[in-house]
Image: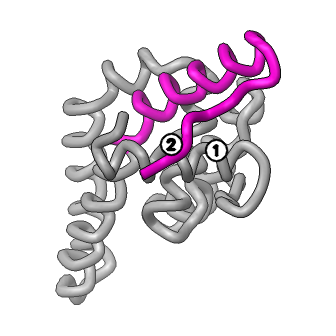
Amino acid sequence: ITAQRVFKNNIEKAKYYRLVWNVKKAYPYAVLAGVKLKQYNNVLEQMPAEAQRKIYMKKAEQELKNQFEKDLKKLSVTQGRILIKLIDRETGNTSYALVKQLRGSFSAFMWQSLARLFGNNLKTEYDPSKGEDKQIEQIIHQIEDGVM
């Protein structure tokens, strides 16, 4: 049971419902990222050779691009920023750390540079105890509880 949200004014109300909209768009991709990462890590742990891991990761990356690239390109910059935070929430690692771990330092640097061009930061960490992240956490709990 949650209390009815009270807003100071209509601008605050509009911002909140825009955040709800953006979280609803980004959250399923973050959950899927967490699931896929666990699957890939399980497979990679069983591969003895680094060459095999690299080949597997390139195939996995191509599969993910084919499946999700069109949808992810449709996300707004704000939804992308929220997705970066939610990936940290779901995986326990920043997006930058994940790219660095799976694709290498140079690739992580290039993606971070591209993200910075659009006003985002792949090194952003999720902190549900303060600010916008606190509201995002509340929205996620409502989504998981079926309230939203």
Q: Relative to 70, is 7 on the left or the right?
A: right
Q: Which residue is mark 2?
A: 139
Q: Residue at x 32, y 19 (%)?
A: 70
Task: Write down the region rendered in magenta.
Answer: 1-29
Which amino acid does the dot numbered 1 rest on?
Gln
Please state which of residues 100 and 21 is positioned toward the viewer in this rendering: 21
Residue 14, visible in the rendered structure: yes
Q: Is residue 11 magenta?
A: yes
Q: Is residue 42 magenta?
A: no
In the image, farthest residue toward the top: 10
In the rendered image, residue 49, in percent from the top left (x then y), is placed at 26, 84
In the rendered image, residue 141, in percent from the top left (x then y), is placed at 44, 52
In the rendered image, residue 89, in percent from the top left (x then y), is placed at 52, 61
Q: Which residue is mark 1?
A: 135
Please state which of residues 12 and 44 is positioned toward the viewer in this rendering: 12
Q: Residue at x 40, y 48 (%)?
A: 30
Q: Relative to 142, is 145 on the left or the right?
A: left
Answer few, some or many: residues within 10 Å of disc 2's Cα (few below 14, many 20 plus, some between 14 and 19): many
Q: Is residue 50 above or below residue 140?
A: below
Q: Relative to 109, is 34 on the left or the right?
A: left
Q: Relative to 55, is 16 on the left or the right?
A: right
Marks 2/1 in contact by CB < 8 Å: the verdict is yes
Please state which of residues 72 and 14 is positioned toward the viewer in this rendering: 14
Q: Residue at x 65, y 58 (%)?
A: 126
